Image: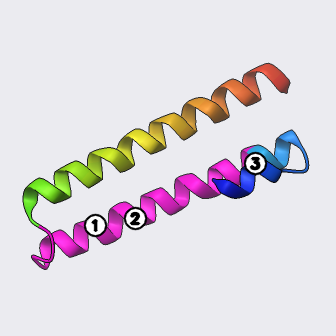
Amino acid sequence: MRESEYAESRADFVHQLRIAIKEANETQYWLELLHQADYINKKGFKSINQDCIEVIKILIAIIKSTTKNNY
């Protein structure tokens, strides 16, 4: 996400946000593995996973509004 602050164009901005969504999805994958291996408890998993879901929703909304208004 930090890289999107210095995007060279709107298309680059959207591209950086799409990468951030992929990274958030990968984070969810690793969280699931940590939970399944009992490295994090159910409560911790649910909390962090919900945060990831919210971040993804925000990123999607930003992409939609950026592409809707500028393409």
46 shown above or below 34: above
Secondary structure category for the residue under label 3: helix
Which residue is at the far top? 69
CA distance for labels 3 and 1: 27 Å
Describe residue 58's horizontal placement relative to residue 14 as left or right: left
Residue 44 falls in image quadrant: bottom left
Percent x, y of residue 41: 9, 65
Identity, as a three-letter code, of the amino acid under mark 1:
Leu
Residue position marked by numbered label 2 in the rendering: 27
60 sits left or right of 67 in the view: left
Magenta span covers which residues?
14-40
Amino acid at pointer 2: Thr
Which circle, 2 or 3, is nearer the viewer?
A: 3
Residue 5 numbered mark, or none: 3
Residue type pointed to by label 3: Glu
| Sequence-first disc among 3 and 1 | 3
Report whether 45 appears left or right of 10: left
For the residues labelled 2 and 3, say whether their Cβ atoms are less than 8 Å apart.
no
Judging depth in this view, the residue of 43 and 26 nearest the camera is: 43
Identify the residue shown where x is 67% and y is 55%.
2
Residue 27 on image: x %, y %: 40, 64
Question: What secondary structure is marked by label 1?
Answer: helix
Whole-percent x, y for residue 53 in the image: 36, 44
Which dot marks residue 31? 1
SS category of the residue bearing label 2: helix
